[in-house]
Amino acid sequence: MSKLNNLIERMENEIDTDNFIEIMDDCIQEIEESGIGIKAVEPLLQFIERHPLSDFGAPGSIVHFVEKFYKQGYEPLLISSIKRCPTMHTIWMLNRVKNGEQEQQVYFAILNDIVHNKDIDEEIRREAQDFLS
């Protein structure tokens, strides 16, 4: 996991810079090639949590990577991340999951909780409200 930690640290050092997307893409490619698999999902979500308003792309290489584990354990990790610290990007990721699920009520409830939690950044709460509309 030290390789994963080093790659996340490399992204951390470039967050919100003009080079970030390119660095992130390179790091995610290395993570993918390393075979770490789903064990990388939670640390990547925690990285996003540390930067709740940052731009990670649309959807970006992190999302493309973690969504490979859809229906293989990704969804509970995403929900745990959002319950710890919702971000602009993770609620957007939840909306993507919600749109592909038959059991949408759980995801609607999480978004609704975000909307009504005054401890969460107003911009994130507005984004969650948009996903409920």
Image (cartoon, rainbow, N blue to C red):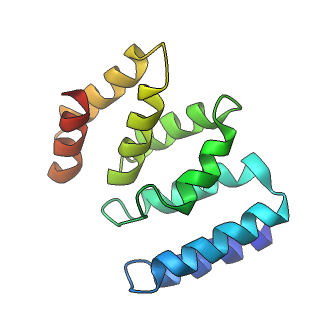
Quadrant location of the N terminus in the rendered image: bottom right
Residue farthest to the right, as pictured: 35
**Between 27 and 86, which is closer to the camera in this rendering?**
27
Left or right of 55, for residue 44: right
Above or below, 15 against 127 in this view is: below
Q: Is residue 63 visible?
A: yes
Q: Position of residue 11 (x, y in %)?
A: 55, 77
Direction from residue 102 to residue 77 in the image, left or right? right
Quadrant of residue 62 within the rendered picture? bottom right
- Is residue 103 rendered to the left or right of residue 122? right
Q: Residue at x 73, y 46 (%)?
A: 38
Q: What residue is drawn where x is 18% and y is 31%?
A: 116
Residue at position x 40%, y 24% in the image: 107
In the image, 112 versus 94, the foreground residue is: 94
x, y (%) of residue 67?
60, 43
Q: Visible in this render: residue 119?
A: no
> How far across and down, in percent of the image, does residue 53 sit?
30, 62
